[in-house]
């Protein structure tokens, strides 16, 4: 009985640390924090990339035709949306075309169903 109680008491700090760690990793970035110049490119071919501008108003500017080609969607991206753990490129109809997951500081990553991996990297870190 004492052993079970000791295990239970030892688990409480671990649960609290995990809860705090998870909560802090899911802080929603503001559009102003993510606004700026970005490069969208295939993981294995940076030279084939597109220059994009994420505006604080959540509109997307830059080489949108190139971005559309890279993500392989019929609809051209025209906006973007931050979420706690992703950055979504949005179509004109307001639907999310792709969700880039946080990969490294200043870099988001998306892998298509066919296995193609794209990186979205902030230019001015």
Image: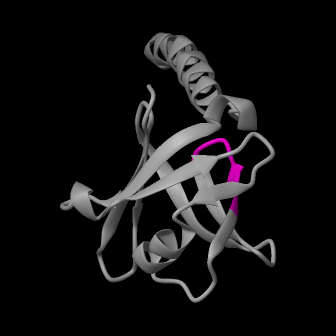
| Residue 42 position (above or below residue 19) | below
| Residue 77 position (above or below residue 73) | above
Residue 115 picture location, percent across and down? 29, 75
Q: Residue furthest bottom?
A: 74
Kindly identify the residue that appears in the image at 63 percent across and 47 percent down. 54
Q: In this orientation, which residue lies closer to the viewer: 115 or 37?
A: 37
Kindly identify the residue that appears in the image at 56 percent across and 61 percent down. 99
| Residue 78 position (above or below residue 47) | below
Q: Quadrant of the C terminus?
A: top left
Query: Residue 36 is drawn in which quadrant?
Result: top right
Q: In this orientation, which residue lies closer to the viewer: 97 or 69?
A: 69
Q: In this orientation, which residue lies closer to the viewer: 107 or 84?
A: 107
Kindly identify the residue that appears in the image at 66 percent across and 29 percent down. 33
Residue 30 shows in this picture = no
Q: How is the image coloured?
A: one colour
Q: Residue furthest front?
A: 62
Residue range in magenta is 79-86
Find out whether residue 83 is within the magenta segment: yes
Identify the main secondary structure in magenta: strand
Kindly identify the residue that appears in the image at 64 percent across and 57 percent down. 61
Q: Is residue 96 left or right of residue 124?
A: right
Residue 12 picture location, percent across and down? 58, 16
Q: Is residue 95 left or right of residue 89?
A: right
| Residue 46 position (above or below residue 123) | below
Residue 43 shows in this picture = yes
Residue 119 picture location, percent across and down? 37, 54
Query: Residue 103 is drawn in which quadrant?
Result: top left
Q: In this orientation, which residue lies closer to the viewer: 70 or 50?
A: 50
């Amino acid at each position: 009985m004492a052993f079970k109680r000791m295990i239970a008491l030892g688990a409480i700090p671990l649960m609290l640390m995990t809860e705090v760690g998870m909560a802090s990793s899911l802080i929603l970035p503001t559009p102003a924090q993510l606004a700026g110049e970005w490069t969208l490119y295939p993981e294995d071919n940076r030279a084939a990339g597109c220059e994009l501008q994420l505006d604080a108003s959540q509109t997307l500017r830059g080489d949108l035709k190139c971005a559309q080609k890279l993500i392989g969607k019929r609809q051209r991206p025209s906006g973007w949306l931050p979420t706690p753990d992703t950055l979504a490129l949005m179509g004109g109809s307001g639907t999310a075309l792709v969700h880039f997951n946080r990969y490294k500081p200043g870099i988001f990553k998306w892998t298509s169903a066919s296995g193609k991996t794209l990186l979205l990297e902030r230019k001015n870190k």
